[in-house]
Image (spheres, helix red, strand yellow):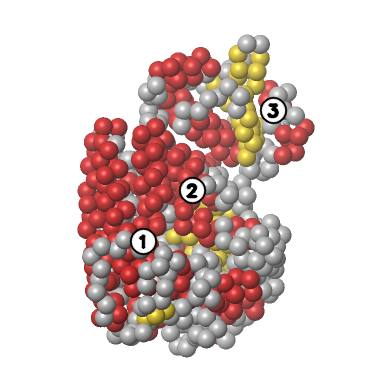
Amino acid sequence: AETGYELWLRYHKIQNTELLNGYLGQIKSFNVVGSSATHDVIRNELSAGLSGLLGQTFEPSTSSKASLLAGLSDEPTIAQYLSESELTQLGKEGYLVKAISQKESSRFLITAKDPVGLLYGTFHFLKLLQTNQNLASINILENPKVDIRILNHWDNLDRTSERGYAGFSIWNWHKLPDYLDQRYIDYARANASIGLNATVLTNVNANALVLTPAYLEKVKALADLFRPYGIKVYLTARFSAPIEIGGLDTADPLNSDVTNWWEEKVKEIYEHIPDFGGFLVKANSEGQPGPQNYGRSHAEGANMMADALKPFGGVVMWRAFVYSSEEPDDRAKQAYSEFNPLDGSFRPNVLVQVKNGAIDFQPREPFHPLFGAMPKTPVMMEFQITQEYLGQATQLVYLAPMWKECLDADTYVNGQGSTVSKVVDGSLHDYSITGIAGVANTGTDINWTGHPFAQANWYAFGRLAWNPDQTAQQIAEDWIRMTFNNHPKTIAALSDMMMNSWEASVNYMTPLGLHHLMGTGHHYGPAPWVSNLSRADWTPVYYHKADAFGVGFDRSENGSNAVSQYAPEVAKIFNSKDEIPEKFLLWFHHVGWDFEMNSGRTLWNELAFRYQDGVNTVRKMQEQWQSVQPKIDDERFKSVQMLLTIQEKEAVWWKDASLSYFQTFSKRPIPDKVEPPK
Ligand code: GCU
């Protein structure tokens, strides 16, 4: 049965016989020239991939005449096929996959400067077969646009996973370091296949225990396994670790016992893991300890750790997800207010990690104002792959369009075209180091991610981290072909479902810029009425501010003035009820129920229309899924069918609960049919 365990690395025999025979004519043997642990991985992957896809056994050959040659660019067997310009274009992790013609027949070459680039090129070549591409004149040269392409596992040492919806943590700390689960290898393969090169094993709400010797043994075992796949291991570092596991009575970053403790700890880590990546730190955020406990700044805290890591080449990823309930100012403004003044005061090996939006991974947020606002500090992106606020593991929501909306947004900080992706890839401010992080959605479920389509979010995250300029549609199509099949009907139906799914979820949960109205704590399902929590900034009514006049959070100049944190060109548009894109209207404005929308409807009727539209789209997704039943294996078909039934129910629940609640303020009828006005 198809369990989904293989993810997009399904190497099932190609169904189209004409195509299959064509490939068999072109690929008769393969030779991976050279040796390293990564070369062995490549040999295994090509054997498995070619044997599976082409339906014949492929063993590695040593012939220089093999039809597929893979090797580093300085191998003489390979170098003869390379031009000067190809060599200069190839970056450290880049690769070249091309057809080399000889006499009548064409042969193929995969090359790179570094073994890991060769592995990336190998996965690209296999993808060409999986997606049924014509190989005749392929010539693909790729380099990643971002340096650190990293998953953040919010996994605890007891194997629970914060905001994980696919079972328990895949790290079995109890059995490590001696028992090495096959899952670890398949995890590394999956990540390498989409170009991810780093992973943080532990939760941002860290437990200092992972930094103790017994756990470092276990971390080392994982790092050793991941190394041939080009994946570096990072850990979260709890700021108060010197107290909790070091026996000190302070964690003050300017105290010399504390700096010594971190220096020694870092040395110890590198003795275990010579290529350890560094630390991810959540400090003075949601109750976590940090430098401010000692009257020190975020920069002083981050720099202390950065200095300890510097001799070994490690980095600190310091999170900017800070807000406090004591602070009377709008939560959306707090991270910028704290971090923007610190620009220029961080060590060069510190990156500031910023969520895509200023609140918290809502279904839709305008881009975070810190993007573009720290020209002297590498600002890295934090996306959330796990669907904390997006229906968790029961709803089909393809997140690439959401990430693209953020990456493509124009910050205007250096004039038009200063997109968030240019901040993140470092080209706008000439950052010396760049990164993009995704909060992982993996767990012990057989299919890794709970919902079969949630695999697409892991996949798309890797693809966008490699190159933020790719389109969500192209990534979806590749994923569908690799994960399901290459039938045009499958591709058309599934890509349409995926491409519409995010907008649908925004519509049935929080349309027009509404946000943070989910059930308290678990963040699943609607609870816009919750008004009596101990913290105002966790309370839904704080965010929607519905009253007899209207609804929405006034962040304009007349309100919290969050708009002022954006470049003037952007601020001007966000500040105006008439110019702002309606998708962000209620994020920035408190708007009257009878306000006239672009459609000609009143705000109230438009809200009703959006909620219904979201529901309608889910119903359409159900029909589209039904239409491909003959093309999909039974197990995955039924699983998605049942999940879509849940999603439809919950879309209706969101719509009914939200409209009934808002109606207590608007006092207007819920139109039973909201057609656009004629
Ligand atoms: C959200 C999430 C928390 C998480 C936090 C963070 O608030 O609900 O579970 O710890 O983000 O990103 O630090």
Name the residue beneath numbered marker 1: 678
* Front position among marks 1 and 3: 1
Cα gap from disc 1 to disc 3, whole angstroms: 70 Å
Cα gap from disc 2 to disc 3, whole angstroms: 37 Å
Q: Inspect the image, locate mark 1, and give the three-letter code of the amino acid beneath it.
A: Lys
Quarter occupied by the C terminus: bottom left
Q: Is the residue marked by circle 2 packed among few (<14), some (14-19), or many (20+) residues within 10 Å?
A: many
Residue 672 falls left or right of residue 133: left
Asked whether the beta carbons under mark 1 and mark 3 sit within 8 Å of each other, the answer is no
Residue positioned 27% across, 77% down in the render: 668
Residue 474 falls left or right of residue 375: left
* Front position among marks 2 and 3: 2
x, y (%) of residue 502? 39, 56
Name the residue beneath numbered marker 2: 472
* Front position among marks 1 and 2: 1
Using the image as rendered, state which of residue 534 and residue 175 is in the foreground.
534
Name the residue beneath numbered marker 3: 75
Residue 465 falls left or right of residue 607: right
Residue positioned 76% across, 34% down in the render: 85
Q: Is the residue marked by circle 1 packed among few (<14), some (14-19), or many (20+) residues within 10 Å?
A: few
Quarter occupied by the N terminus: top left
Outermost residue on the top side: it is 104
- Mark carried by residue 539: none
Q: Inspect the image, locate mark 3, and give the three-letter code of the amino acid beneath it.
A: Glu
Outermost residue on the right side: it is 84
